[in-house]
């Protein structure tokens, strides 16, 4: 019933087969399966217009509030979509994941719902709020390394030793398809948007958005945004020298990934229209903007996408813009750092 309604409605120009950059025979029905699978599980989050950003950009700007999603982030979509499709044998081995925070909570919640034990490897730099939230969902947390990549390697070693089922945070087609449901909702809620702005780290949300948008409404532009301190996807997308790509601390720790996924990059290269970077000052300013003007505390990854709009980085053709506010799990102890970084960087709206 849900699928029929979708295909007769705003998704009426879809096809059953398509070339998604990861193979020549990708069945786009998988996207609709994910949408249907998650309908009764995740929140259909608000997609609200920002009058302040409208005035500032002279465009229509809509904010997709995944910070109001279960666990405070879009990541629960991909985790549930992946885990829902695991076999009994895979679940019996237990679930294992690596995460900077939000994927951890998604896997922990999905595992608890399915009655499967979950172990998460997280960097020691993960905000304590994300660590404690993951534990509250019933997962065992191991803090390892200074970055996601170090925690990821430790988790993979654990997988080899124990045989646990690994749930990748981004480089897995089922996870990507779960994240794609964010854009699918957006296209239903505001059918006339012409541009979607997406924060990107490993690329799961960006790849999912691009896959859904170019399947459903290919004229809509998809623009990815990364922190200038960790622009791995930007470098790969534009063919820049990987050895000169910076990998520095960022207030957007959720998108601080050194190596984007192979599956995600295949989709991103084929279907994303543009990649941008924003500075630490710009991200911090966007966090404060969202708190002061939109009355929401969002995390640095979400603020990166907002920062691209605030700083007018989008092409002039972008008139009806959807911004994915990817999460709200911000470490409040970093607010003072935001204010300090914004002292000499002020946008007056």
Image (tube, rainbow, N blue to C red):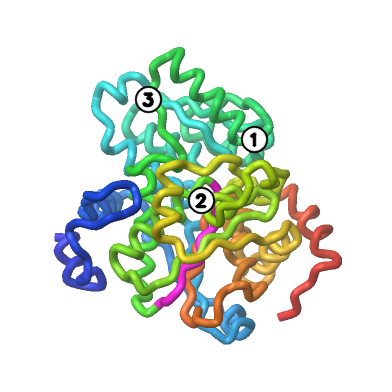
| In the depicted structure, whether residue 300 falls above or below residue 263 | below
Indicate which label's residue lies in the foreground, 2 or 3.
3
* Residues at discs 2 and 1 in contact (Cβ within 8 Å): no
Q: Which residue is mark 1?
A: 147
Residue 159 visible (yes or no) = yes
Q: Residues within 10 Å of mark 3 (few under 14, many from 20)?
A: many
Give residue 251's position: percent from left, percent from top: 70, 50
Q: CA distance from mark 2 to mark 1?
A: 21 Å
- Taking 155 as reference, is 283 left or right? right
Q: Quadrant of residue 285?
A: bottom right
Give residue 222's position: percent from left, percent from top: 45, 66
Task: Please name the residue shown 51% across and 56% down the image.
Answer: 326
Name the secondary structure under disc 1: loop
Q: Which residue is mark 3?
A: 165
Name the secondary structure under disc 3: strand
Task: Please name the residue shown 55% across and 77% down the image.
Answer: 315
**Residue sitting at the far top:** 161
Asked if residue 82 lies in the magenta stretch, the reply is: no
Give residue 145's position: percent from left, percent from top: 66, 28
Q: CA distance from mark 2 to mark 3?
A: 24 Å
Q: CA distance from mark 1 to mark 3?
A: 22 Å
Asked if residue 194 lies in the magenta stretch, the reply is: yes
Quadrant for the C terminus in the image: bottom right
Q: Residues within 10 Å of mark 2 (few under 14, many from 20)?
A: many
The region drawn magenta spans 193-201
**Is tag 2's residue or tag 1's residue first in the polypeptide sequence?**
2
Task: Please name the residue shown 44% across and 70% down the image.
Answer: 221
Give the numbered dot on residue 177: none
Q: Which residue is mark 2?
A: 72
Task: Please name the residue shown 46% across and 68% down the image.
Answer: 196
């Amino acid at each position: 019933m849900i699928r029929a309604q979708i295909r007769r409605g705003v998704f009426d120009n879809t096809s059953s087969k398509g070339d998604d950059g990861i193979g020549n025979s990708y069945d786009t029905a998988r996207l609709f399966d994910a949408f249907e699978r998650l309908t009764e599980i995740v929140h259909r989050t608000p997609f609200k217009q920002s009058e302040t950003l409208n005035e500032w950009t002279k465009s229509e700007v809509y904010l997709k509030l995944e910070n109001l999603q279960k666990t405070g982030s879009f990541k629960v979509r991909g985790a549930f979509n992946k885990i829902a499709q695991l076999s009994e044998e895979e679940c019996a081995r237990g679930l294992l994941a690596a995460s900077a925070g939000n994927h951890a909570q998604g896997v922990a919640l999905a595992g608890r719902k399915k009655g499967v034990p979950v172990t998460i490897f997280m960097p020691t730099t993960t905000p304590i709020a994300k660590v404690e939230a993951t534990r509250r969902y019933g997962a065992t947390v191991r803090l390892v390394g200074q970055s996601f990549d170090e925690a990821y390697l430790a988790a993979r070693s654990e997988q080899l030793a124990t045989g646990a089922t690994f749930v990748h945070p981004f480089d897995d087609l089922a996870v990507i398809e779960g994240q794609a449901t964010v854009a699918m909702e957006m296209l239903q809620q505001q059918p006339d948007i012409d541009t979607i702005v997406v924060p990107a780290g490993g690329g799961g949300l960006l790849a999912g958005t691009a896959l859904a948008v170019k399947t459903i409404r290919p004229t809509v532009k998809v623009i990815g945004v990364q922190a200038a301190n960790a622009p791995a996807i930007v470098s790969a997308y534009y063919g820049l020298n990987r050895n000169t790509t910076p990998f520095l601390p960022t207030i957007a720790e959720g998108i601080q990934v050194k190596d984007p996924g192979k599956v995600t990059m295949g989709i991103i290269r084929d279907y994303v229209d543009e990649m941008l970077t924003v500075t630490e000052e710009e991200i911090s300013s966007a966090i404060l903007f969202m708190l002061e003007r939109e009355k929401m505390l969002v995390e640095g990854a979400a603020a990166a996408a907002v920062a691209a709009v605030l700083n007018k980085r989008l092409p002039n053709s972008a008139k009806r813009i959807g911004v994915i506010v990817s999460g709200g799990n911000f470490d409040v102890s970093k607010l003072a750092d935001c204010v300090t970084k914004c002292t000499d960087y002020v946008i007056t709206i």
